[in-house]
Image (cartoon, helix red, strand yellow):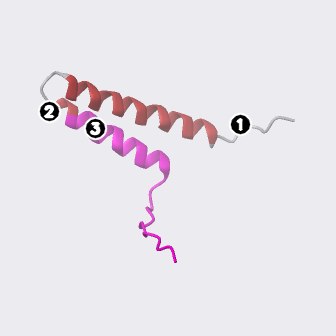
Amino acid sequence: MDIRSHFPQSQKSLYQRLTDEAQRLRKEAHGTQPGVGRERLIRKARQAETACHIDAWLSSPGLRAPM
């Protein structure tokens, strides 16, 4: 029998979670010395922001299915 691990459901939307993560990463990068570690944090923040924009675009009411 397989046992599934349980993750609690978040009350925040994906958009809000991605925005929060991007802000957290940028704040962490701001307090980090210049170098590879800082650049990785900034890159992850940009990826979260891009995912946030894609989520907003996909959930927009103007998006229609092809006919």
Horizontal side, residue 6 vs residue 34: left or right: right
Extreme-bottom residue of the structure: 1
In this rendered view, identify the residue nearer to me: 1 or 18.
1
x and y percentages locating residue 47 in the rendered image: 42, 32
Extreme residue in the right direction? 67
First in residue order: circle 2 vs circle 3: 3
Circle 1: is it few (<14), some (14-19), or many (20+) Cα within 10 Å?
A: few
Q: Position of residue 28 (x, y in %)?
A: 20, 37
Say whether marks 2 and 1 touch (CB < 8 Å): no
**Residue sitting at x 47%, y 31%:** 50
The verdict on residue 48 being magenta is: no
Q: Which residue is mark 3?
A: 25
- The answer to which image quadrant residue 54 occupies is top right
* Amino acid marked by disc 1: Gly
**Residue wearing tag 2:** 31
User: Where are the magenta residues, as a range?
Assistant: 1-28
